[in-house]
């Protein structure tokens, strides 16, 4: 009796998917944009979850700092949500007139906060050795370095320091 080729090919397909994950070089990062169309990344190890939240799920807090959008209930855990553009001194704030907002829940030593961003690009493997020192002074210390994506257009992907963001005084200002 010959083996069924339709069932025997599926395990091979899953095996190659796992091999692809194991054979990737570098570290896994979440890529996203803020309102000014600048692209940033965070290490996947600090990203707890990515949420597409309707604006009415974010509860505004009276007299809160300007950067804070409010709080969000994430499976029974209340987290503060802030517009990441304010932390980065971006000229444009997040558009809150749309139906849903992308929120990246990041965690550092049991402290979890939500960072509202314009849009999520996805996950990508990047080489940590290729990070260049940050030359921009407009990001107030929240950027650790950058990857050059396109030398001709000077397009770069900036790596954020989640620890500096979480410990920032903007949460309580």
Image (tube, grey):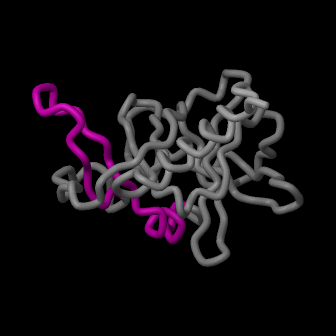
Q: Name the side, left or right, on which 115 lies relative to 86.
A: right
Compared to 148, does 143 lie above or below? below
User: Which residue shows up at 71% across the image and 54% down it?
Assistant: 63
Furthest-right residue in view? Answer: 76
Q: Which residues are magenta?
A: 143-170
Furthest-bottom residue in view? Answer: 109
Foreground: 48 or 6? 6
Residue 55 pos. (x, y %):
76, 33
Residue 73 pos. (x, y %):
83, 53
Q: Which quadrant of the structure image shows residue 110?
A: bottom right
Furthest-left residue in view? Answer: 152
Foreground: 118 or 71? 118
Residue 152 pos. (x, y %):
10, 27
In the rendered image, the quadrant that contains the C terminus is bottom right
Magenta includes 110? no
In the rendered image, the quadrant that contains the N terminus is top right
User: Which residue shows up at 45% across the image and 51% down it?
Assistant: 29
Compared to 121, does 137 lie above or below? below
Magenta includes 162? yes
Residue 31 pos. (x, y %):
45, 41
User: Which residue shows up at 64% across the image and 60% down it?
Assistant: 113
User: Which residue shows up at 12% across the image and 33% down it?
Assistant: 151
Q: Which quadrant of the structure image shows residue 4?
A: top right
Q: Which quadrant of the structure image shows residue 7?
A: top right
């Amino acid at each position: 009796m010959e083996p069924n080729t339709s069932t025997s090919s599926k395990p091979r397909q899953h095996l190659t998917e796992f091999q692809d994950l194991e054979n990737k070089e570098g570290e896994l990062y979440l890529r996203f944009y803020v309102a000014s169309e600048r692209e940033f990344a965070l290490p996947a190890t600090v990203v707890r979850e990515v949420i597409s939240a309707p604006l009415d799920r974010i509860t505004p807090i009276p007299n809160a700092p300007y950067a804070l959008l409010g709080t969000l209930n994430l499976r029974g855990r209340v987290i503060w949500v802030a517009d990441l553009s304010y932390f980065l001194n971006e000229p444009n704030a997040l558009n809150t007139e749309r139906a849903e907002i992308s929120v990246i829940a990041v965690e550092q030593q049991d402290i979890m906060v939500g960072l509202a961003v314009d849009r999520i690009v996805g996950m990508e493997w990047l080489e940590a050795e290729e990070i260049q020192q940050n030359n921009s002074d407009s990001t107030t210390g929240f950027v650790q370095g950058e990857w050059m994506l396109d030398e001709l257009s000077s397009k770069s992907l900036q790596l954020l320091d989640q620890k500096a963001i979480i410990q920032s005084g903007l949460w309580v200002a």
